[in-house]
Image (tube, grey):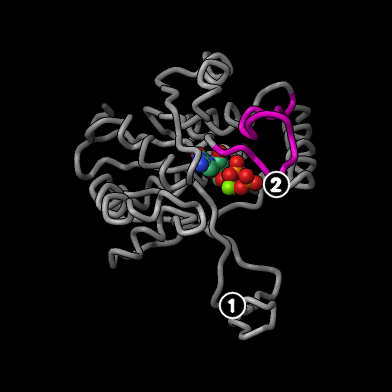
Amino acid sequence: MPSKSESCAVLTAAGSGSRLCCEGPKALVELSGRPLVWWAARGLRAGGVGAIVVTAPASSIEEFRSALSDIDDLTVVAGSDRSRQESVALGLAALGRCEADTVVLVHDAARPLTPPQVTERVIDAVAGGAGAVIPVLPVTDTLKTVDASGVVVGTPRRSDMVAVQTPQGFRWDVLIRAHEEGASLGADEARAATDDAGLVEAIGGSVQTVAGDERSMKVTRPLDLALAQILVAEETSA
Ligand code: CTP
Ligand code: MG
């Protein structure tokens, strides 16, 4: 169990990566010889995070343990094959009971290159009194809402919108209550929350934003992986 002053994290890595079209779990896809989940865990640690629980696909636990064996204070547990939300809930249970004001982060292994400064900003904002904190970037595309047949029904003002990244940070008691109250949604990815802050919003909690970073991009499709490979090559040659 992390001490009161130390933050902890759930690192979600139990997805299959169906949009990336690779063999095996997406989090084990390599960048410069190390899997995405290793880069993500290393980045969290560099940002000051203590205990880390990684949620892996149940059939690949041993592969994840061996890929992450050089990172200390890290535990690999089985995530859910039903939804990301349920994987986070399993990761929180594995962290064990924490003090109400412990800072807990939830981060996606699909964001391997999050700069430590983003993690620090999130931790500092929660330690400074916010119940929930998310890193965000301005939106560059125009966004529209559409109906079931694809007809546009609205154009929200772009300046009112932000793109949301991880790690998201929370007071322990806030995140636990949000997950408990939203648990029934987790059985189905289509109904589940796509981020943890959404569960906090659903219980009426306030969510603060801090600046995200372009390098914290999510590896979802093949083009994203190509970009991540370029960014890692730049970093390792610098
Ligand atoms: N995730 C998880 N458990 C699930 C689904 C997703 O832990 N049941 C994790 C993924 O491993 C990833 C993060 O949640 O680190 C964000 O999900 P996403 O980028 O959608 O990854 P996948 O679900 O693996 O990809 P896809 O949706 O293309 O199948
Ligand atoms: Mg997914």
In front: mark 2 or mark 1? 2
Name the quarter where the C terminus is drawn.
Answer: top right
Can you identify the residue that label 1 sits on?
159
Residue under label 2: 19
The answer to whether residue 207 is left or right of residue 57 is left
- Estimate the x, y position of residue 78 in percent, counting from the top left: 44, 28
**Image check: 235 left or right of 102?**
right
In this rendered view, identify the residue nearer to me: 209 or 55. 55
Task: Categorize mark 1 by other alpha carbons within 10 Å: few (<14), some (14-19), many (20+).
Answer: few
Image spot of residue 164 (x, y percent): 54, 58
Residue 201 lies, with reference to residue 42, above or below; the image says below
- Residue under the point 58% across and 61% down: 137
Label 2, ligand 1: CB separation under 8 Å? yes
Q: Nearer the viewer, residue 116 or 224?
A: 224
Task: Provide the residue span drawn in magenta.
Answer: 15-32
- The answer, for residue 15, to whether it is visible in the render is yes
The quarter in which the N terminus is drawn is top left
**Residue drawn where x is 20% and y is 44% of the image:** 100
Circles 2 and 1: CB atoms closer than 8 Å: no
Residue positioned 52% across, 35% down in the render? 14
Q: Is residue 67 left or right of residue 234?
A: left
| Residue 64, position as x, y percentages in the image | 55, 21
